[in-house]
Amino acid sequence: MSNIIKTENLVKRYFLEGTYIEAITDINLNVTKGEMVALMGPSGSGKSTLLHILGGIDIPTEGKVFIKEQDIFSLSEKKLARFRNINIGFVFQFHYLLPEFTALENVMIPVQIYNKKEAREKAEKILIRLGLKDRLNHKPSQMSGGEQQRVAIARAIVNNPSVLLADEPTGNLDTFNTQIVMEMLKELNKKNNVTMVIATHDEEVAKYCDRIIFLRDGRLQT
């Protein structure tokens, strides 16, 4: 099977208080199309940094990232933004929903950038599919944590991305809502063949995945 995600010698180095700190070091990672991967490791191991670089949100100090064989950091900022919007969905632990917008409006945003006509129809369809038919016009403050996370997932997948990256997507959820979210992600993975990399501390979450990758002190554990 072909690799949909590939990294070559990734390094991310920060300058802090007069010294350089390497958040990740020599990361060589391959993820095949349709694979669901858990990224595990203690706090500070570099999971979020790696995920942000894979998603083109952060820029590596050294190394390359290929998504669908495209060297994403060879693209201009504008082309990278477009590539990311079309090909990569990102789910954050803290949702980052816009508080003044409804669930429907939050999910419409990624579609409106390029196709305003289809935005409402696509957003409604995905929210209904995720069991939020009665929450379309509710703002985040009117929804539970589990409902907000489902809205965040809807926003991440509304453009049918090839790759979904999730950073502790169940970190603030109870057991019941964690199960709902993970079963939903697993269904999307299987039915739509969406490749997923999920950073998590939770072994129960990792059980939904096909493979577990461990990070410690910014290095992949083999």
Image (spheres, grey):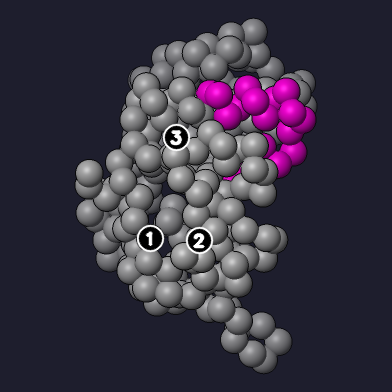
Q: Is residue 179 located in the magenta-colored stretch of the structure?
A: yes
Q: Is residue 49 left or right of residue 75?
A: right
| Quarter occupied by residue 210 | top left
Residue 50 badge: 2
Residue 24 spot, x, y in % from top left: 52, 71
Residue 217 spot, x, y in % from top left: 60, 72
Q: Nearer the viewer, mark 2 or mark 3?
A: 2
The three-letter amino acid code for the residue at tag 3 is Pro
Q: Is residue 177 located in the magenta-colored stretch of the structure?
A: yes
Spatial CA span between label 2 and label 3: 23 Å
> Helix, strand, or loop for circle 2?
helix
The three-letter amino acid code for the residue at tag 1 is Leu
Q: Is residue 179 visible to us here?
A: yes
Q: Is residue 149 left or right of residue 72?
A: right
> Helix, strand, or loop for circle 1?
loop
Q: Earlier in the sequence, mark 2 or mark 1?
A: 1
Q: Quadrant of the N terminus?
A: top left
Residue 193 spot, x, y in % from top left: 34, 30
Dot 2: within a 10 Å radius of its alpha carbon, few (fewer than 14), some, or many (20 or more) residues?
A: many
Dot 1: within a 10 Å radius of its alpha carbon, few (fewer than 14), some, or many (20 or more) residues?
A: some
The three-letter amino acid code for the residue at tag 2 is Leu
Q: Residue at x 61, y 37 (%)?
A: 205
Q: Residue at x 60, y 14 (%)?
A: 132
Residue 29 badge: 1
Range of the magenta residues?
167-184
Closer-to-camera residue (110/148)? 148
Spatial CA span between label 2 and label 1: 10 Å
Residue 110 badge: 3
Q: Earlier in the sequence, mark 1 or mark 3?
A: 1
